[in-house]
Amino acid sequence: MNKEDIISVYTREEAIADGIIFNAGRIANREVDLTTNLIEQLDKYELTKAIVEGLDLARHFRQPDTKEIVVNGKKV
């Protein structure tokens, strides 16, 4: 992707301020952000599992797109 392909830049801080993402805090020295859409779709146990699996991916220095995280049959 080059600069001509970018219509707008939306920062993490702007997304938090607008309520698009929610900062759930820090776990294992990493910021944990959740989209409001994900929060609406999953119950608290599914959210917990998704967070733990996401942190496991980050801990092993793998890119987030190398594995789909599936919780109770839902891709998150």
Image (tube, rainbow, N blue to C red):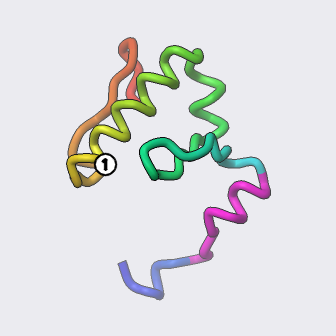
Check residue 16 for magenta coloring.
yes
Q: Mark 1 is on which residue type? A: Ala
Q: Which residue is mark 1?
A: 58
Query: In the image, residue 49 lies at what x, y percent?
Result: 42, 23
Front residue of 23/37: it is: 23
Judging depth in this view, the residue of 73 and 59 nearest the camera is 59
Residue 52 occupies quadrant:
top left
Q: Residues within 10 Å of mark 1 (few under 14, many from 20)?
A: few
In the rendered view, would you say 31 is above or below 39?
Answer: below
Residue 76 lies left or right of residue 43; in this view the side is left
Quadrant holding the C terminus: top left
Under circle 1, the secondary element is helix
**Residue drawn at point x = 66 percent, y = 37 percent:** 36
**Residue 48 location in percent, x, y?**
49, 24
At a point 60% along the width and 42% down the height, the residue shown is 35
Q: Answer with left or right where residue 21 lies relative to residue 61.
A: right
Residue farthest to the front, as pictured? 28
Q: Position of residue 51 (x, y in %)?
A: 45, 33
